[in-house]
Amino acid sequence: MSTLAELKRKLTLGAVVVMTRNDWFPNGKLIGISRKVIKVQTNAIQFEGGSWLRFTKATDFVDINSTGFSVKLNPEKETELMSYAFSSISN
């Protein structure tokens, strides 16, 4: 898996991810918490608790692989990222 299209196919209803990094909120309460996808749209997914992950430009999604992915928080700064790992827990 290496493209946004492949990532979208993996992030289906019931998929679980764990936020591992958020450069805007490095000590945020969501880091390290398993979060289940409860709603899927073509442009975003919603997690339990109400927060959304929007699918912006494909170039904003980096390091997509079988263990997780990262999203650029600020497209102008390559180093500001929010990263997720896929959880072994699902549905």
Image (cartoon, rainbow, N blue to C red):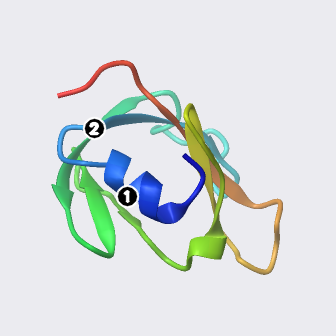
Residue 52 picture location, percent across and down: 33, 62
Residue at 79%, 80% in the rendered image: 76
Residue 80: image quadrant is bottom right
The front one of 62 and 1 is 1
- Nearest to the eye among marks 2 and 1: give it: 1
Q: Quadrant of the C terminus?
A: top left
Where disc 1 sits, the SS reads helix
Badge 2 amino acid: Ala
Kind of residue sitting beneath label 1? Lys
Residue at the top extreme, as displayed: 88
Please state which of residues 65 and 60 is positioned toward the viewer in this rendering.
65
Question: Image point 28% across, 38% down: which residue?
Answer: 15
Q: Is residue 78 above or below residue 6?
A: below
For this view, does 76 lie left or right of residue 22? Answer: right
Q: Which residue is mark 2?
A: 15
In this view, the residue in front, 22 or 90, is 90
Residue 90: percent from left, percent from top: 25, 25
Identify the secondary structure beneath mark 2: loop
Q: Are marks 2 and 1 in contact (CB under 8 Å)?
A: no
Q: Position of residue 35 (x, y in %)?
A: 32, 36
Residue 30 relative to residue 42: left or right: right
Give the CA distance from mark 2 to mark 1. 11 Å
First in residue order: circle 2 vs circle 1: 1
The structure residue drawn at horizontal position 66% and vertical position 74%, both measured from the top left corner, is 59
Relative to 48, residue 31 above or below? above
Q: Which residue is mark 1?
A: 8
Residue density around tag 1, few if under 14, some if 14–19, many if 20 or more, within 10 Å: some
Crowding at mark 2 (Cα within 10 Å: few <14, some 14-19, many 20+):
some
The number of callouts visible is 2
Residue 8 at x, y percent in the picture: 37, 58
Task: Please give the label number shown on residue 34.
Answer: none
Camera-nearest residue between 47 and 89: 89
